[in-house]
Image: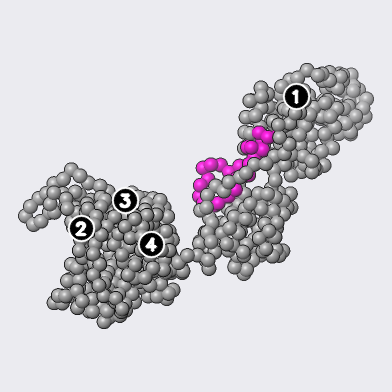
């Protein structure tokens, strides 16, 4: 900063400034003296500073002049890391988005004789102050959105292209770009967005650009039935997420979101918005390395900055609804299973003891939902838990297995259900159930979660919840074209108003005897339910397999030869596999045979959820013993 520039800022003559800084100011009034001294201090003016500072000696100090340090944490981390590696110290100056503050920082860096400066200008007009550095032979590297074309920059156009391409790969065509108006970054992201659309033969229209300046940006999303949105900034995406949530949009079920992520603190985990991190840390290392190489007159190690950024997760991404695979909805009991291993099952008049027990999430709703999810299907579970610790175990297990939990409600008046399972050494078991919140699943809960039945292929209905809830669930499933599978549990009779909406009925032999008193043969028992509107009856027979009767099919299927350790979850494994493979397009005969293998695997291990098999393992095994059975 020269004496002429100080005089201009203070609105006085050069001689007045000279007198004040050289203590020859007896005839100058106090107000003028104080104003000049304030500017001299703020802009780091020293008389004859050019002559004093001019020196070729290195200080090994670099200046970092940022438009806003609060938004540059990762950039600073990268710069400081590289500076340390090369034996340099760093002076950080924050312009707080003020051109006046920026000029003060420039003069401070000059006064401190830094070897080089990384400069993120407040605006393009700020670049005229570069002569202060040039006059002192201070090397400076310009970066940021206000920098000229030949400066260092992150390729936001490429990041915009990458984010748009992810939406396209998820089969989205009705997409839009939500931008922060008037920013250079938004312009570049839009360029990448347009290029991606062009490369994928998706016509671009101006209506694909959403701006928070417009009052209609949200109504545009609704009116145009957009399925995917790219946001230029994480803060914009958070605001959008909040707005969509107010109008009961489910992300990513109704709409997919992707954003570029800046210096987002790691502790912000919710909501789960998928994003491509902007590589500020890597960019900081790159620009600092280049500046040091220029200061030391070394050859550049690389000429341009390029860093591949990886999508952090896919929590807010899904294919559009019309392209989505048919799902399975399970409406049923949610319990914590406490399994006791015994030499013999308890009976009247005799106490038994054991030192072996296990605890897992369970209930037929949970078991069948996890079973179908492990076999590759999107699954939604509808049911209730309490507000106790057990409920946390349920939610954790559902999340771990990829089951949609939107339909699981919390009941403030009841605890999570519990099942006490006694398992004999030969695998036979008995179950006692503490119903808990399961008894409070109502028809209104089904109505409130009706959207979960959209695109459902099958609805699984284990009867651990009230009859009228089962009836409403079956009716709702039929409304959306889903087939229904009913597993009778804890029932002595099944009302006809439920059976008329059931496609496949799967009791075990003991349940069938209770439901059909006086009818002894399996064919006659099956006919009893076929006459009430059920399409297919499958009676499971434990280690003897199952009996099936429907229009066009009647036969016994043998059980698969597995050593039984715990048969508690056999029926749940069978039902989830049956629905899964029918949904994959297998015939009823083929699906029953495959389901028999899934049930066999489940009986060969302790517990239910840990014993449910995944699709790859199941099909690999079947291909070895029945290679023609798996063909899709």
Q: CA distance from mark 1 to mark 3?
A: 62 Å
Q: Image point 86% across, 19% down: which residue?
A: 51
**Closer mark to the observer between disc 1 and disc 4:** 4
Q: Which mark is residue 296?
A: 1
State the residue position of label 2: 431
Residue 201 image point, x, y percent? 67, 63
State the residue position of label 3: 610
Residue 331 image point, x, y percent? 35, 65
Q: CA distance from mark 1 to mark 2?
A: 78 Å
Q: Quadrant of the N terminus?
A: top right
**Closer mark to the observer between disc 1 and disc 2:** 1
> Residues in magenta?
262-287
Q: Is residue 510 above or below residue 600?
A: below
Q: Nearer the viewer, residue 205 or 507?
A: 507
Q: CA distance from mark 3 to mark 4?
A: 24 Å
Contact (Cβ within 8 Å) of mark 3 with mark 2: no
Residue 601 image point, x, y percent? 29, 55
Sequence-wise first label, 1 or 2: 1
Q: Nearer the viewer, residue 94 or 623?
A: 623
Q: CA distance from mark 1 to mark 4?
A: 67 Å
């Amino acid at each position: 900063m020269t004496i002429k520039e100080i005089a201009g800022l203070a609105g006085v003559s050069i001689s007045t400034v000279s007198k004040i800084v050289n203590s020859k100011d007896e005839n100058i009034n106090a107000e003028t003296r104080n104003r000049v001294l304030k500017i001299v201090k703020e802009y780091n003016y020293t008389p004859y500073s050019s002559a004093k500072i001019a020196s070729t000696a290195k200080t090994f100090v670099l200046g970092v002049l940022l438009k806003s340090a609060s938004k540059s944490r990762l950039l600073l981390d990268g710069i400081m890391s590289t500076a340390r590696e090369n034996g340099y110290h760093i002076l950080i100056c924050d312009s707080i988005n003020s051109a006046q503050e920026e000029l003060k920082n420039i003069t401070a860096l000059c006064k401190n004789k830094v070897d080089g400066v990384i400069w993120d200008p407040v605006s393009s007009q700020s670049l005229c102050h570069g002569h202060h550095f040039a006059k002192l032979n201070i090397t400076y590297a310009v970066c940021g959105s206000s920098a000229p074309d030949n400066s260092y920059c992150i390729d936001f156009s490429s990041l915009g292209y990458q984010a748009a391409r992810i939406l396209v790969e998820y089969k989205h065509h009705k997409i839009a770009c939500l931008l922060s108006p008037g920013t250079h970054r938004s312009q570049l992201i839009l360029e990448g967005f347009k290029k991606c659309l062009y490369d994928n033969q998706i016509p671009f229209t101006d209506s694909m650009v959403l701006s928070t300046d417009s009052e209609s940006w949200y109504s545009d999303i609704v009116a145009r039935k957009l399925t995917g949105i790219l946001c230029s900034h994480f803060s914009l995406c958070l605001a959008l997420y909040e707005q969509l949530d107010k109008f009961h949009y489910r992300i990513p079920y109704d709409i997919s979101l992707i954003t570029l992520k800046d210096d987002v603190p790691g502790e912000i985990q919710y909501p789960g918005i998928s994003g491509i991190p902007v590589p500020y840390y890597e960019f900081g290392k790159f620009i600092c390395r280049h500046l040091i190489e220029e200061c030391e007159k070394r050859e550049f190690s690389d000429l341009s900055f390029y860093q591949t950024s990886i999508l952090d997760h896919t929590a807010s991404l899904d294919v559009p609804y019309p392209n989505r695979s048919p799902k399975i909805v399970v409406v049923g009991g949610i319990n914590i299973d406490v399994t006791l291993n015994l030499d013999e099952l308890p009976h009247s008049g005799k106490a038994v003891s054991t030192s072996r027990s296990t605890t897992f999430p369970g209930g037929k709703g949970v078991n069948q939902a996890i079973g179908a999810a492990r076999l590759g299907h999107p699954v939604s579970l509808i049911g209730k838990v309490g507000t106790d610790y057990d409920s946390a175990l349920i939610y954790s297990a559902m999340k771990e297995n990829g089951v949609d939990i939107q339909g699981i409600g919390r009941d403030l008046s009841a605890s999570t259900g519990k099942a006490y399972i006694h398992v004999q050494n030969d695998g036979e078991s008995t179950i006692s159930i503490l119903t808990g919140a399961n008894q409070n699943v109502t028809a209104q809960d089904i109505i409130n979660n009706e959207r979960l039945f959209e695109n459902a292929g099958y609805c699984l209905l284990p009867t651990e919840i009230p009859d009228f809830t089962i009836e409403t669930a079956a009716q709702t499933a039929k409304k959306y074209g889903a087939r229904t599978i009913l597993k009778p549990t804890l029932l002595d009779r099944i009302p006809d108003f439920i059976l008329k909406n059931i496609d496949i009925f799967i009791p075990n032999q003991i349940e069938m005897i209770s439901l059909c008193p006086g009818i002894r043969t399996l064919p006659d028992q099956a006919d009893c339910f076929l006459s009430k509107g059920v399409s297919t009856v499958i009676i499971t027979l434990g280690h003897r397999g199952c009996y099936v009767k429907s229009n066009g099919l009647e036969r016994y299927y043998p059980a698969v030869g597995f050593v039984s350790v715990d048969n508690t979850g056999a029926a749940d494994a069978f039902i989830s596999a049956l629905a899964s493979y029918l949904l994959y397009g297998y015939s009823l005969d083929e699906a029953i045979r495959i389901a028999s293998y899934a049930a066999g695997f489940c009986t060969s291990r302790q517990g239910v959820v840990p014993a449910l098999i995944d699709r790859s393992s199941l099909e690999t095994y079947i291909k070895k013993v029945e290679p023609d059975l798996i063909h899709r």
